[in-house]
Image (tube, rainbow, N blue to C red):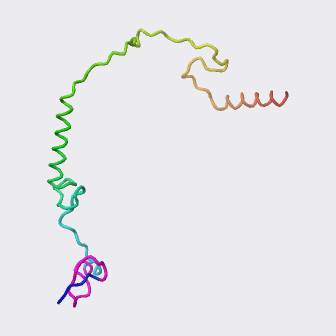
Amino acid sequence: MGFIKCPRCELNYIKEEEQYCSVCKREMKGEAHDDPFELCSICNENPVMPGKDVCLMCYKEMTQQQGLRDDSMDETETTEVNIDMEDVSEMEEIELEGMPEDMPEDIGEQISLEEEKSKEDVDDEEEEEI
């Protein structure tokens, strides 16, 4: 009495006198099979912890590495960098020269599309006259 691979899935072994493995039989009958556990997303070997997507071993390893990173971050000293720049309140306002005439004085001023279109039409007419 020997074992052969299931002819449908070619994953599971079955006895020679059987046609399909139990998994394929369930699938062909339309029965849903819920695995009682999921495998770890990191090692794919151990079942996951409830509410997590990693197993206990990977979780311990991750927290240990995180703890080492936190310790190394605590050891580093933060130093203040002085780049000899004046404070914003001490800066002078810059006057811009050579601004276009049709530029709105207040940047927040709205220019309607219709006004812009009419200006473009006038410019096009002037170019055609030349």
The structure residue drawn at horizontal position 56% and vertical position 11%, both measured from the top left corner, is 95
Q: Count the numbered circles shown.
A: 0
> Horizontal and vertical percent for residue 120?
72, 30
Which residue: 56% across, 18% down? 106
Q: Nearer the viewer, residue 64 or 87?
A: 64
Q: Is residue 94 left or right of residue 128?
A: left
Q: Is residue 86 magenta?
A: no
Position of residue 11 relative to residue 18, above or below, is above
Residue 22 at x, y = what percent? 22, 80
Q: Is residue 57 left or right of residue 24?
A: left
Viewer-proximal residue, 27 or 80?
A: 80
* Image coords of residue 99 (percent x, y): 63, 17
- Of residues 86 and 84, the one drawn nearer to the viewer in this rendering: 84
Give the image quarter of residue 27.
Answer: bottom left
Quadrant including the N terminus: bottom left
Q: Main secondary structure of the magenta part?
A: loop
Q: From this view, report whether residue 52 is shown above or below residue 23.
A: above
**Eyeballing the image, is 87 above or below 36?**
above
In the rendered image, which quarter contains the C terminus? Answer: top right
Q: Quadrant of residue 38?
A: bottom left
Query: Residue at position x 20%, y 53% from top?
Result: 52
The image quarter containing residue 15 is bottom left
Give residue 69's position: percent from left, percent from top.
Answer: 20, 37
Left or right, residue 104 beside residue 8: right
Magenta residue check for 24 = yes
Closest to the observer: 54 or 57? 57
| Residue stretch in magenta | 7-25
